Image (cartoon, rainbow, N blue to C red):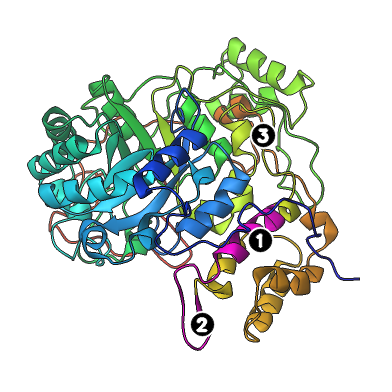
Amino acid sequence: MRTTLGSGLLRNCYQNPIVPGSFSCRHQSHRTCSAVVRCMATSKDGPGRQLLSVAPMMDWTDVHYRQMARLLSKKTWLWTEMVVDKTIIHTQQLDRHLWFPPEQHPVVLQLGGSDPDTLAAAVKMALPYGYDEINLNCGCPSDRVAGAGCFGASLMLEAGLVARCMDAMARAAGDTPVNVKCRLGVDDADSYEQLKAFIRVVSEGSPVTHFIMHARKCFLKGLNPHQNRTIPPIRYEWVYALKRDFPHLTFSLNGNIQGAYEARCYLDYTGPLPEPGAEEDTAGCEPAPTPHPAPAPAASSSTDTDAPAADGDAAASAAAGGDGATASSSTRAAAENGSSSGASSSGPVGPAGVGGYIEGVMIGRQAYNDPWGVLSDADRAIFGEAANPATSRRQVLAEYCQYADAMLGRWAVKGDGHMEPGVRTMIKPLLNLFHGEKGSKKWKNEVDGILKANPATLREVLDRSLHCLPDEVLDAPPRTGPCALAATHGVLSAAEPRPVQLKRMPVPEDRAGRPKPAGGSGNTSGSPPPPPPPGTRATPW
């Protein structure tokens, strides 16, 4: 018996045809429509803090991925791919680059560019679409960005120019906030003092108060984008130190964080901040108890992640140094209360980040590679909602299918019947929805075979392929994580998030951002370090 999505599950909100260039509202002006869209999509108090966001990723976080992600989480902030300012100014199909359905709010538009006037002009053209915030890319080391003029990560070498760009963007944006996404450093400009100087110049020369920090440096030459995400070591402590040194600004943390519960650990961290100017010290500082413990994890089945290897007291003690006296009694009591309160694993847990140092956490490729695992429990785990919007992946498929089939051919239909976007484009965001699940590989192979026959709709593809996935996978609820308080103190299995431990500020360092070997001079040539051996990656601690 064939497994299908089911007919009539949802009202088709996209049943009316969408005319390219009309911004989906066929009887209103472009500007009026966008104002109505924004009013409908945001509450009277605005979209709130960016506690959790999905990073901008070229070729990945397009409007279709964002639609699928929004079905998983109503609260997580979504970012566009980077759009070059000149593309916005010169394109004949502006909707193709900037349009998005109103339910995708809150959405941040990321721009690439380095000329203040051009960026300001692009911002003015983007304003009618109603983006919640607008960002300038100062962190991408890709040749497609940093090698195409002075923008992307190379802008970190021109702090004064960034300040002028942000001032021009803010003037053009009016009430729409603008912010900067950057690295910790670039090439030889990689000391903490140089990073502080960049933040100071940009914040004093423009209205920017929010910086999204990818917590590692990058090399403009010598490493490809993948190596720039794995070889330079993570330095979360630098981001917390920035909050110490610029308490009037807000900072979000990006880099190597794998899920919502790990994100909550960093949001809720209220322990000691790194000490300035100290020598490298790998001993972690014990974090203070988090103010809003999440519910205890539900009993694991054989297909779930491994259960915690120790009880709360033992694991908290081990994480703090191995002896029971090291972990405070209040910490242990809070962990016990959090795990024995009897709260349902699907109940509300309270919002993250109350009293913490950082504004939010941004998750990158993991949110694309395993969207269900990262986002399906985010509204409850991070934002304190009573429930998550998606009860199962079958529901997500049904809702996304409504959107996708209405979008087919929106941008163009060629003489041979080829549609832009087509079915192959629309199914791309779904391919990782069953990451790690039984039947996932078989389903992908089945989908590939169906696509070769040029199906007319996405619904046809799904109806013909979902028999490859067991009903228990299609109908499984969101996976819940461990108690966030316990996670912060190490009450975890090896498969769960690491405890938050901040190093002291590293001084001195080599050109790769690594501590210098004892008695050695390190790598001072300015060239990138060699790649790590196959199968390894730089550790963040």
Single out the residue that lies furthest toward the top: 330
- Whichever of labels 1 and 3 marks the residue nearer the N terminus, that label is 1
The residue that disc 1 covers is 401
Which of the 4 quarters of the picture holds residue 317?
top right
Q: Quadrant of the C terminus?
A: top left
Whether pointer 1 and pointer 3 mark residues with C-beta atoms closer than 8 Å, the reply is: no
In the image, what residue occupies the spot 22% across and 53% down?
153
Residue 479 relative to residue 102: left or right: right
In the image, what residue occupies the spot 86% across and 70% down?
2
The Cα–Cα distance between marks 3 and 2, rounded to whole angstroms, is 47 Å
The residue that disc 3 covers is 482
Say which mark, if any, is on residue 271.
none
Residue 50 relative to residue 276: left or right: right
Mark 3 falls on what kind of element?
Answer: loop
Which of the 4 quarters of the picture holds residue 194?
top left
Q: Is residue 454 above or below residue 52?
A: below
Single out the residue that lies furthest toward the front: 27
User: Mark 2 packing: few (<14 Cα in 10 Å), some, or many (20+)?
Assistant: some
1 or 3: mark nearer the eye: 1
The residue that disc 2 covers is 418
Three-letter amino acid code at the position of disc 3: Pro
Is residue 291 or residue 359 the one in the foreground?
359
